[in-house]
Amino acid sequence: MHAANNQPSSFSGVWQIFLYNWHFYAAALVLDLIAVIFLVEFSPSPAIRLAVMLGSAIVSFWAVSSLLVSHYIYDRSRLFQWNWLASVVNRNPVSRKSGSAGFAFKKL
């Protein structure tokens, strides 16, 4: 997912998030489709209709907003350009620390 100049594409970060969590997005899509089919085929009472629509809206909001925020953080912000790190880190550190979210490492 890198461009020819070895820079990440404008959607490479959000694409990685999507691929890692694809099953959650697929489940959200399936739940929304079930809700639409239920509302069209069964014509439930207004209270049930409202509950189903509210649940579907929450599921859709979660899926879309998580991808939008991931795109902003990983693809649009300067976080992954790493230029900011030089101003934060001492040039000659006495010690070093490393942090990880865990999913980037494989068991050896």
Image (tube, rainbow, N blue to C red):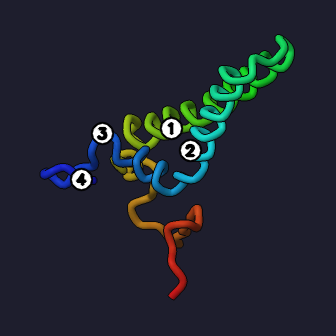
Residue 10: quarter of image: top left
Indicate whether 13 appears above or below 64.
Answer: below
**Earlier-in-chain disc, 3 versus 4:** 4
Give the residue at x 57% y 38%. Answer: 29
Of badges 4 and 1, nearer the viewer stands 1
Helix, strand or loop under label 1: helix
Q: Disc 1, disc 2: CB below 8 Å?
A: yes
Residue 17: image location, x then y, percent: 48, 50
Amino acid at pointer 1:
Leu
How crowded pointer 1 is (Cα within 10 Å; few <14, some 14-19, many 20+) is rated as some
Give residue 52's quadrant in the image. top right
* Residue matched to label 1: 67
Tell me whether the residue at label 3 lies in contact with that at label 2, contact meaning CB atoms closer than 8 angstroms: no
Report the Cα–Cα distance between label 1 and label 3.
13 Å
Q: Residue at x 62, y 46 (%)?
A: 27
SS for tag 3?
A: loop
Q: Residue at x 66, y 20 (%)?
A: 40
Q: Position of residue 34 (x, y in %)?
A: 66, 35
In depth, the one of 71 and 39 nearer the eye is 39
Q: Earlier in the sequence, mark 1 or mark 3?
A: 3
Residue under label 4, please give it: 2
Earlier sequence position, callout 1 versus callout 2: 2
The answer for how far apart the CA atoms under marks 4 and 1 are is 19 Å
Foreground mark, 2 or 4? 2
Numbered circle sitting on residue 10: 3
The residue tagged 2 is 25
Residue that protrudes farthest toward the left in the picture: 4
Q: CA distance from mark 3 to mark 4?
A: 9 Å
Local crowd size for mark 2, using a 10 Å CA cut-off: few (<14), some (14–19), many (≥20): some
Mark found first going from the N terminus, 3 or 2: 3
